[in-house]
Amino acid sequence: MSSASSSDAQHELPGDALSPAPVVGAAAPHSAAEKSLRSHIDAMIAPEILEAKEAFERDLPELVREHEGQWVAYYRRQRIAFGSSMPGLYQQCFQQGYHDKKILVRFVEEPFDGPCEVLFDV
């Protein structure tokens, strides 16, 4: 599994877990169908997660400079914690009272802007 797919984790509604996570730095949808699909997916994602995603993308250059290789958690537009491991970061968030909130957890790394291949061994 690539680091991009294994490094993104979202604590959100079960139905949202099946939606593809937007890739930071990925090209914007070009066709009307792609734009419609993106709009439909965004409508299914909790507003707290969308706000957190926007904040993460906004902060990414600073995060890469100062916290590359760490995990970061957001609640809405607020950065709430950093951690060296995902389980440790979730534990920090829960200790801060975010156990019943929708939080976004991401691994801090340079965005990947190239093509992506997924290989399956069947």
Image (cartoon, helix red, strand yellow):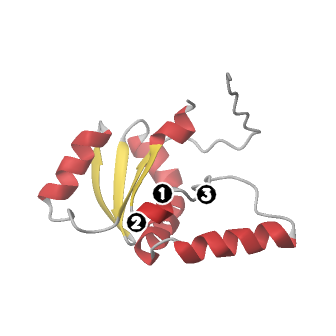
Residue beneath disc 2: 13
Say whether residue 89 is left or right of residue 114: left
Position of 96 relative to 85 (above/below): below
Name the kind of residue labelled 1 in the image. Answer: Ala
| Residue name at image x 36 percent, y 50 percent | 72
Image location (x, y in percent) of residue 77: 39, 71
| Residue name at image x 21 percent, y 64 percent | 98
Mark 3 touches mark 2? (CB < 8 Å): no
Say whether residue 121 is left or right of residue 18: right
Q: Residue lying farthest top?
A: 121
Say whether residue 52 is left or right of residue 41: left
Mark 1 touches mark 2? (CB < 8 Å): yes
Residue beneath disc 3: 22
Q: Residue lying farthest right?
A: 31
For disc 3, the neighbor class at 10 Å (few under 14, some 14 to 19, many from 20) is few
Q: Secondary structure at mark 1?
A: helix
Image location (x, y in percent) of residue 38: 69, 69
Residue beneath disc 1: 17
**Nearer to me, 15 or 57:** 15
Q: Nearer the viewer, mark 3 or mark 1?
A: 1
Q: Quadrant of the N terminus?
A: top right
Q: Secondary structure at mark 2?
A: loop
Q: CA distance from mark 3 to mark 2?
A: 16 Å
Work out whether mark 3 precedes mark 1 in sequence or the reverse, and give the earlier one. 1
For disc 1, the neighbor class at 10 Å (few under 14, some 14 to 19, many from 20) is few
| Residue name at image x 48 percent, y 64 percent | 15
Q: CA distance from mark 3 to mark 1?
A: 12 Å
